[in-house]
């Protein structure tokens, strides 16, 4: 039997790069997993082109890979969205820059490769009435009903990310003070206020829901939110319960965990919250990230203006009185 082929220069570079991301940059497990997935697909592409060393990669080959990302994927599903393709290129750039820094390659082939253009998207929040309908759809006296209501209240009331929610431990909650400590992106801690409805929902869950779920067993540790087996609820579990509540509320596929974060921020800006306060609440490193919510509010303002103001859509030089006379 022939010997298995040993690792090549590309394997070595990937292993060292993975260690660098975890140890030196301190990326979180979910981010590391995303890098691993993107780089696995990239190295598969390189090997298909006979490349087994990072020093042998050319700018033309990287450009071809970007084109592959944006094209049909040979039965593996539709082309990647521009944002996903851009994220994949970030992982590729990180690998090649690391190789240059570590002397594993003489040049960076991604230097002159333009990333896919990502359209500036404006979040599509729920209305306040839709949020009320969603919360009502999750109500129920059974343990999972209490848990689901508490989760939706916290996602909307505190604007937390799904990863921040599933990572919460009971020691992070201070319901008397109305705050929760969350660990955000880049392992940055922040203290987030929680409103009265969310506090009441979490209290009801902790008193009557969580103990019943905890009796199911499982390695729950000190997690706030438990699954039906008594273990820490996962991101996938939260996604499924939020989508199920959205279906019961008649909101269809518009509802997913992050839309509640969008809705929280948008409703605060609509009601006059300072954008820097919203930035602090959401844990955004850059104010530019938060300013998208001012665009949402501006779009809403324009729609209300167009619908309500008598001169919003009149042709230039024509008065409302002239139009009324013409209709007689």
Image: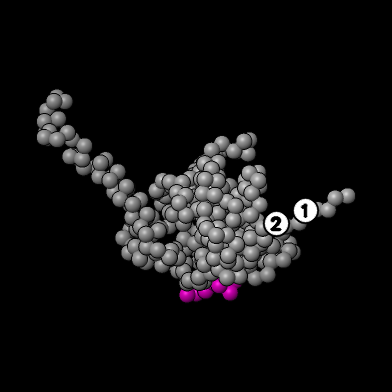
Tell me the residue at 64%/49% (across/down). Answer: 51
Tell which of 307 and 286 is nearer to you: 286
Which image quadrant is residue 223 in? bottom right
- Toward the right, the furthest residue is 1
Q: Which residue is mark 2?
A: 8
271 sits left or right of 1 in the view: left
Residue 271 in percent (x, y) is at 33, 58
Residue 56 in percent (x, y) is at 60, 52
Is residue 318 visible to us here? yes
Tell which of 52 and 321 is nearer to you: 52
Q: Which mark is residue 312?
A: none
Q: Which residue is mark 1?
A: 5
- Region in magenta: 170-178
224 sits left or right of 116 in the view: right
Q: Secondary structure at mark 2?
A: loop
Residue 120 in percent (x, y) is at 39, 48
276 sits left or right of 252 in the view: left
Tell me the residue at 52%/57% (across/down). Answer: 108
Mark 1 → mark 2, Cα distance in angstroms: 9 Å
User: Looking at the image, do the residues carrying marks 1 and 2 touch, with CB atoms under 8 Å apart?
Assistant: yes
User: In the rendered view of the protein, which quadrant contains the C terminus?
Assistant: top left
Q: Is residue 183 above or below residue 39?
A: below
Tell which of 102 and 165 is nearer to you: 102
Badge 1, how many Cα within 10 Å: few under 14, some, many 20+? Answer: few
Tell me the residue at 47%/54% (across/down). Answer: 111
């Amino acid at each position: 039997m022939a010997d298995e082929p040993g690792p090549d220069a590309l394997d070595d570079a990937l292993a060292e790069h993975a260690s660098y991301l975890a140890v030196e940059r301190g990326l979180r497990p979910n981010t590391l997993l995303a890098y691993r997935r993107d780089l696995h697909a990239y190295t598969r592409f390189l090997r298909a082109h006979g490349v087994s060393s990072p020093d042998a990669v050319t700018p033309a080959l990287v450009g071809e890979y970007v084109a592959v990302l944006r094209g049909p994927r040979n039965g593996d599903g539709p082309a990647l969205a521009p944002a996903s393709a851009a994220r994949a290129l970030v992982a590729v750039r990180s690998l090649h820059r690391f190789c240059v820094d570590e002397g594993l390659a003489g040049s960076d082939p991604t230097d002159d490769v333009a990333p896919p253009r990502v359209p500036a998207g404006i979040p599509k929040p729920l209305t306040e009435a839709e949020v009320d309908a969603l919360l009502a759809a999750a109500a129920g006296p059974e343990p999972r009903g209490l848990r689901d209501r508490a989760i939706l209240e916290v996602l909307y009331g505190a604007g937390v990310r799904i990863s921040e929610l599933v990572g919460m431990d009971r020691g992070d909650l201070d319901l008397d003070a109305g705050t929760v400590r969350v660990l955000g992106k880049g392992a940055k801690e922040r203290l987030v206020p929680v409103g009265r409805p969310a506090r009441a929902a979490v209290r009801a869950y902790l008193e009557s829901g969580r103990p019943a779920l905890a009796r199911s067993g499982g390695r729950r540790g000190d997690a706030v939110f438990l699954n039906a087996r008594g273990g820490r609820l996962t991101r996938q579990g939260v996604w499924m319960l939020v989508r199920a509540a959205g279906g019961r509320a008649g909101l269809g596929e518009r509802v997913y965990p992050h839309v509640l974060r969008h809705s929280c921020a948008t409703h605060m800006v609509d009601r006059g919250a300072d954008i820097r306060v919203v930035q602090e609440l959401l844990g955004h490193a850059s104010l530019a990230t938060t300013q998208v919510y001012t665009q949402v509010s501006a779009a809403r303002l324009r729609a209300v203006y167009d619908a309500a103001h008598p001169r919003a859509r009149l042709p230039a030089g024509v008065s409302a009185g002239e139009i009324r006379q013409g209709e007689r």
